Image (cartoon, rainbow, N blue to C red):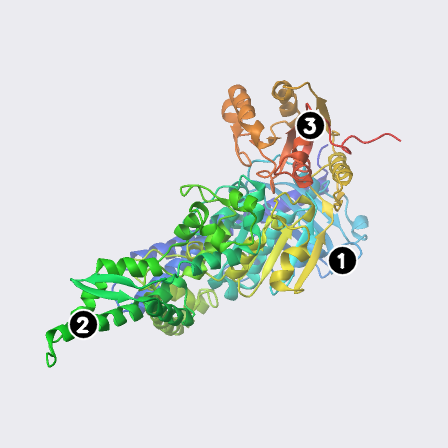
Amino acid sequence: MPETSSAHHELEHERHYVAGLYQRLDELREEKREQLAQVRRSHSAGSHQNRSERDAFATMYEDRLAQLNAVDDRLVFGRLDLDDGEERYIGRIGLSTEDLQRLMVDWRAPEAGTFYQATAFERQGVRRRRHLILKGRNVQAIEDDVLDYTMLEEEEALQGEGALLAALNSKRTGQMSDIVGTIQAEQDRIIRAPLAGTLVVQGGPGTGKTAVALHRAAYLLYTHRERLKSAGVLLVGPSNAFIRYIERVLPSLGETGVVMSSLGQLMPGISAVPEANAHVAEIKGRISMARVVANAVANRQRLVLEPRRLNVEGTILTLTPKMVQRARDKARATGKPHNEARVTFVKILLRELTEQLTDQLEESAGAGNSTDRAYLAEDVRSSRDVRVALNLCWMPMTPEKLLSELFSKPGHLEAAAPELSEDELRLLRRSPDAAWTESDIPLLDEAAELLGELDASAGRDHALREEQRKRDLANAERAIENTEGFLEDSGAHGILSAEDLADHNTVGEARLTAADRAAVDRTWAFGHIVVDEAQELSAMQWRLLMRRCPLKSFTVVGDIAQTSSAAGATSWQQALTPFVGDRWTLEELTVNYRTPAQIAEAAVRMANAAGLVVSAPKAVREGRWAPFIDQVPEGGLVPRLMEVLPEDLAALEGGLLAIIAEEHHLDAVRRAVGAEYGRRLGTGAGGMEQDIVVTSPREAKGLEFDGVVILEPEELLTAAAGKVGDLYVAMTRPTQRLRLIAAGPIPAGIVEEED
């Protein structure tokens, strides 16, 4: 349909304005590149303060340039026409002219809130909300929402059919896209909720939970920058595939200061694998395992049952039970972690043994011999017998060594966990070289907390670092005072803090952001934590995260109905009450933007038939296809899959298709699909060239695909590791098309019964 004169004029107007925004973006990029180059050209000469200022400005320009580079795609996406005649453009960042005339408002700014919140019933001063659809840097189309009905009489033509539906119908690419241009009112309310406390966002499949979580992280960093920039924000997802899927969203929203981690990466230096046995995951996830770890640590602080003879340079000393008992009691009384308290334990016994050696030598030398015997302390300390005896009583430990021995050495686990049954003890036993699993991570963290630093000097080093940090901060504050005028003139006033300067005051050191430092520091205290698919977390995993955020400022996102982990929660009360009491609030997302109505309704019927009560968010659109159901003979799953794949791929017209099945099917499926489609076969959420994915329902959690094929759906209900949630998750991943192939029975409820 040809454009009307009015429509053409509106489109050209927007193209001209958007071109001006990109021109300003390019100017700012060039300005920051030049400022950065100028700073880098300067030498390291001058005082410590001069070098601090130089490094801090370099970092500021680097950060700003990274932000400007990240927002090129769909820089601007909206315009508000207000009652007072103002046209307010909304984009990924704020932009102004050189003389500070505002060109575009950051989507997180308070004045941008009406773009998402205004309705025809509550216009909030908005006459029209316009969505700008960009391809590259060019405006391709306009979508108008008229909120003031009088405009219908004034305008010759209104533009578009709906930005939201256009976004929903777009093809998946293997990377999550942001929804910044199409945030809905209920989502916006949650995104802009206060920072303090624990906010739970409950939502069924396709309601945009993950998108809301990511946009909330970006919003909080923008709104509470002073507090969160130095402390950082941690975003926790269920799997590495999920993290890869979402990792580009936050930079595109103008934020790069978020630490993103899967549950298996929360212990620095360890990348854990999924726990294969659901029963093992459930046992390790119990809160009582904290006491088991504590017992395991305490059991490495041993007494001796009878006196022990120690040879020190030919002299026999005696280590008595009473000496060890006294030293252990005094070491424990310090309240320090195991490895740090060991220093006290060793000092006491070395002193007593040295006194014993001195007495013996003086006695044998006769009265009146007053030779200096200061060297005797070193003789005692270096004696092999003494070292062995003290280590047997109080061995220094790493978390990895403690846990490895706990699960592999006979008797260790039984002694630490008397409440476990024989069957449970048997399930936990494993070889000492077994890979670390996701359910081990909270136990390793617990052990690290109880053991402390292995290096005895670590405490002193930490104190020295803290003292240096105080001096750096004081120096940085003076530096900012000296450059206050320049910062105001450059528009950077309030952006640069003493923390920024202190972080970069050592010439030659790699400059690390708060996020960089936090990612490698187990003891880092985050300002806020966002947890996606939070229903999967065990009590021990919650305990770990609570330790990471002492202020208990959380955004918790999930759907109890989708719980598939044996250690996961059955209610938010069960998950959160042990840690935050009743100090949490619940928000609910009620609209399904992903799944077509026919598929969503089939998933709900299946869940209800299996006894699972699920929320049924309202689907915003009908799909082209009801679920396809293929019954095949035994052994016919893969042949039928290969038969229907061409049809499903053609129907998706280049979209992303996932084949979801239990683990024991995956190898055979990958071989068959790989032989036929080669490089088109990918992992996780796929990619630009990988439009076919073979995965398990647990790996698919949090992801979405244009089409899904589920093999043997009954197994997703009856597998040892499965719950109703596994099949429910799998059925609600597609945005367009769903097929189920079964040699066994089709789970009840999927096929709609005729009246």
Determine whether 93 is above or below 306 in the image.
above
Task: Identify the disc placed on residue 360.
Answer: 2
In the rendering, at what x and y percent does residue 557 appear? 63, 52
Question: Which mark is first along the chain, 3 or 2?
Answer: 2
Location of residue 622 with respect to 424 vertically, above or below: above
Farthest right residue? 755
Q: Residues within 10 Å of mark 3 (few under 14, many from 20)?
A: many
Q: On the image, which quarter does residue 199 sit in? A: bottom right
Q: Quadrant of the N terminus?
A: top right
Mark seen at residue 123? 1
Q: In the image, is 384 to the left or to the right of 611?
A: left
- Looking at marks 1 and 2 on the same chain, the residue that comes earlier in the sequence is marked by 1
Q: Which residue is mark 3?
A: 740
Rendered-image quadrant of the C terminus: top right
- Quarter of the image for residue 375 reads bottom left
Q: Is residue 689 left or right of residue 362?
A: right
Left or right: 612, with 352 as reference point: right
Viewer-side residue, 246 vs 152: 246
The amino acid marked with disc number 1 is: Arg
> For the residues marked 1 and 3, what is the alpha-carbon distance in whole angstroms?
45 Å
Q: Are marks 2 and 3 in contact (CB under 8 Å)?
A: no
Mark in the foreground, 1 or 2: 2
Quadrant of res 132: top right
Image point 35% across, 60% down: which residue? 393
Q: Nearer the viewer, residue 393 or 257?
A: 393
